Amino acid sequence: SKKPVRVAVTGAAGQIGYALLFRIASGEMLGKDQPVILQLLEIPDEKAQNALKGVIMELEDCAFPLLAGIEAHSNPEEAFKDTDYALLVGARPRGPGMERADLLAANAAIFTVQGKALNKVASRNVKVLVVGNPANTNAYIAMKSAPDLPAKNFTAMLRLDHNRAASQIAAKTGCAVGDIRKLTVWGNHSPTMYADYRFATVNGKSVKETINDQVWNAEVFLPTVGKRGAAIIAARGLSSAASAANAAIDHMRDWALGSKGEWVTMGVPSNGEYGIPKGIVFGFPVTTENGEYKIVEGLEIDAFSQECINKTLAELQGEADGVKHLL
Ligand code: NAX
């Protein structure tokens, strides 16, 4: 049988953590033959550490055959020791009266510390997924704080936006999500993201031609996907948790085990593709194989798409400028 791999999860006592850990432990992320050791990080606060103990008791009570160990930590340098995968879910939410700059600064503090800790103690091949918002910029900060690790190992979660887009297209076309191929979401995990179905097919037919409605694209589809997080908060009184955890599982599973030729969306540092400045963590269409992702290149960008991409890029560059003095 396979040797266990180490999976670090931060914010492990939070609501996404609660929807995520049990699925990692049951083998849904890395395969039903891959034992895992969970290395869980929470803030030192007594309430958070107690909540984490409760989650661990429940993990134990599931008696997962693949769960080879569970650790609780309050120090990132212990939580990230030798870790092969790191899911950075914990972040500072926007509090009452908090300005955008305060939010960026509070998260920069968290992600510089965690990036440095990964740099110091994680496996040299660690695959990092940042879920905590602002996810792209937090991934950028962690990457910049870990100069000894390959930049390509730092990614941000755009998969929830991708899955949301797929579900809207399935509803619109009356087809199953599983029949949709070649969908992508460009840019920032924020309402500025650009979900792009121009290349997508459903049962082999062009989605764009099937829908054939640019007004629906611009005025219904894009705002629905972009504001889906807010719609869920309005309905549930809490932000997306199960769907976010599901997207994190999808992202890591495809990265580790391969997408079998299919496009998936990942937020990854640009190497200059599509004119996105090098290092900016941007949602791109990728394919994955042998534990590596590859950005799909050579796609035509029309005027409408370029405008959308420019807008989400400008937002990301603004965020990067906002944290520059902290790095
Ligand atoms: P919760 O507030 O339920 O849980 C967050 C947990 O993180 C808390 O238990 C907190 O104590 C812990 N935490 C905070 N700072 C930490 C640190 N420095 N080290 C370790 N743990 C720390 O939030 P939850 O609903 O689980 O959401 C977590 C994050 O995901 C938020 O930032 C949220 O905005 C973000 N999301 C990102 C999404 C994406 O698509 N990229 C979608 C869902 C979600 O909104």
Image (spheres, rainbow, N blue to C red):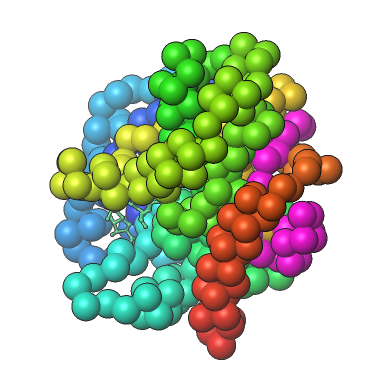
Locate residue 234 relative to residue 109 in the image: left or right: left
Locate residue 237 relative to residue 242 in the image: left or right: left
Residue 189 screen position, x and y as percent: 49, 53
Q: Quadrant of ligand 1?
A: bottom left
Nearer to me, 310 or 239: 310
- The residue drawn where x is 18% and y is 41% is 235
In the rendered image, the residue lying farthest to the bottom is 325
Whether residue 45 appears in this view of the structure is yes
Locate residue 6 relative to residue 79 in the image: left or right: right
Quarter of the image where one finds residue 262: top right
Nearer to me, 74 or 216: 216
Residue 59 screen position, x and y as percent: 31, 32
- The residue drawn where x is 45% and y is 62% is 134
Nearer to me, 168 or 92: 168
Residue 297 screen position, x and y as percent: 81, 43
| Magenta span includes 51 | no
User: Is 187 rendered above or below residue 36?
Assistant: below
Magenta-drawn segment: 270-291
Quarter of the image where one finds residue 104: bottom left
Nearer to me, 126 or 177: 177
Residue 137 screen position, x and y as percent: 53, 65
Quarter of the image where one finds residue 94: bottom left
| Magenta span includes 276 | yes
- The residue drawn where x is 58% and y is 69% is 314
User: Is 193 rendered above or below residue 318?
Assistant: above
Whether residue 124 appears in this view of the structure is no
In the rendered image, the residue lying farthest to the right is 298
